[in-house]
Image (cartoon, coloured by chain):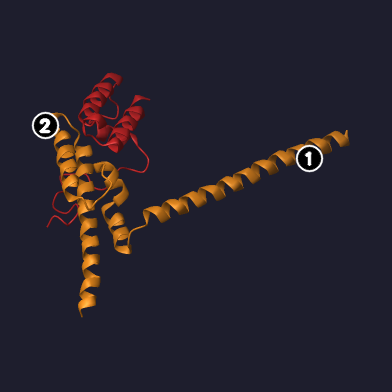
Amino acid sequence: MAKYIAQIIMTGAQVVGRAFAKAVQQEIRFSQQAAKARASSGGGSAQSQAADAFTGMSVQEAKQILNIEDISDVEAMQKKYDHLFQVNDRKKGGSLYIQSKVVRAKERLDQELDLVNKKEEEPKTEEKS
Amino acid sequence: MDSIPGGLTSKYYKGGFDAKMSKREASLILGVSPSANKNKVKDAHKRIMLLNHPDRGGSPYLATKINEAKDMLDK
């Protein structure tokens, strides 16, 4: 009898142990993924990250919303913005919430362009002096 | 003055999409009440999706959000 009880306890301990090891592995994987995501989204400068937090929208999300790859292509961005803004106008049966996100995405990218332009200007002035 | 985010154009909702879709956000996206019945949700989804269809110059990201919103309210 004692032998069986010992066996049951052993198998039970093994199952729990295995599950625990798996959970730890998963936790490690998740934290690695989160770190990677943070590194890729935080590719911008400290200013850019501050703007992310302030506006509540990352550059990455803004790009996705406007469906553009390159934010320096101002003309293409404006075109997409105009189209999406009009299409989602409330008078035409659109949703104000989606229109808002389009507006905020444009705002965020304009802001990012400002930051990039300022950064490009700075080294030049340093070279001159 | 455009560079002040959310300062002057306060008519629009602030920030980006929520990290995880909520019923509240879903109802805002589709422009229906959170307790709207299935038909209302279906109609709203169809209308908004037509406007934002990726084949017609819409954004795929917005399209996924619209579909997500419908799934959220369909339950």
Residue at the bottom extreme, as displayed: A129
Task: Give the structural element (helix, strand or loop) at label 2.
Answer: helix
Residue A58 visible to an observer of this rendering: no
The amino acid at mark 2 is Lys
Q: Chain of mark 2?
A: A
**Number of other residues with Cα within 10 Å of mark 1, as a class: few under 14, some 14 to 19, many 20 or more:** few
- Residue A118 vs B22, above or below: the answer is below
Tell which chain the image draws in orange. Answer: A
Q: In the figure, residue A48 lies in which quadrant?
A: bottom left
- The percent coordinates of residue A14 (x first, y second) are 73, 41
Quarter of the image with the C terminus of chain A in it: bottom left
Residue shown at 16%/38% (left/top)?
Answer: A83
In this structure image, what is the colour of chain B?
Answer: red
Q: In the figure, residue B56 lies in which quadrant?
A: top left
Query: Mark 2 or mark 1, which has the lower sequence index?
Result: 1
Q: Name the mark nearer the viewer: 2 or 1.
A: 2
Which dot marks residue A91? 2
Q: In the figure, residue B2 lies in which quadrant?
A: bottom left
B61 or B13, which is in the foreground? B61
Which dot marks residue A10? 1
**Number of other residues with Cα within 10 Å of mark 2, as a class: few under 14, some 14 to 19, many 20 or more:** few
- The percent coordinates of residue A5 (x first, y second) are 83, 36
The amino acid at mark 1 is Met
